[in-house]
Amino acid sequence: MREMKSLEHGVEGEGEVTKSLVKGMLAGLIGGLVATAAKSVVEKIYPPQAAGAAEPETVLAEKIAGHRLRGAEGTAATAAIHWGFGALAGAAYGGLAEYFPAATAKDGASFGLALATLTQETALPAMGLVEEAGEQTVREQTSEMTSHVVYGLITETVRRLVRPRLG
């Protein structure tokens, strides 16, 4: 198997790593978890849903369960979907970034916007978890875009710091 090397930030001899899908995905997963925490903070400050409205993760968990989830059961199911998706999206991004550095454009902000488009404007409305993009309020749209840009920036920042340390 041919060894492929890349340079982080283009400095010869510093940050040189052999490309590895697994290590890229691990670095992205770690970044995705940290970014999910940051996204959660942004959404507390600038919530996308109106007060009392169900979060898409809750609606999905209840669809999967086939009944309304209450208390700890609902909290655990919603958290599992929220954190699981954040980790998996980060891992996919880390794997992609390993072989296609252009995916890290704008320090991850492009990734965040692409993810918001794929989820909030496409997949979630198609699954009936949120309203169609044209029916969402300006607040919903801007909050989701803002929190996803933060998610992308943090995922990339952490990935970039972690990846060289994995070898």
Image: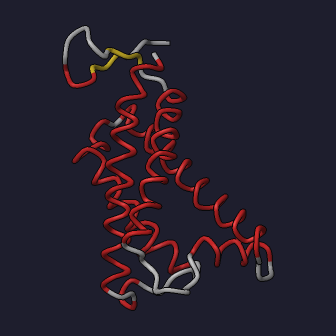
- The x and y percentages for residue 72 are 76, 68
Spot occupied by residue 162 in the image (x, y as percentages of width and height): 42, 28
Task: Give the residue drawn at x 48%, y 24%.
Answer: 20
In this view, the residue in front, 42 or 114, is 42
Visual colour scheme: secondary structure
Front residue of 33 and 3: 33
Total numbered labels? 0
Q: Name above or below for residue 81 compared with residue 135.
A: above
Residue 140: quarter of image: bottom left
Q: Residue at x 43, y 19 (%)?
A: 165
Q: Which of 62/115 is in front? A: 62
Residue at 35% across, 73% down: 143
Going 32% across and 44% down the picture, which residue do you hit? 103
Q: Residue furthest left?
A: 11
Coordinates of residue 119 in the picture (x, y in percent): 46, 68
Q: Is residue 162 above or below residue 56?
A: above
Horizontal relation, residue 142 to residue 74: left or right = left
Q: At which x and y percent is residue 122?
A: 45, 74
Residue that lies at the very extreme toward the bottom in this rendered image: 135
Quarter of the image with the C terminus in it: top left
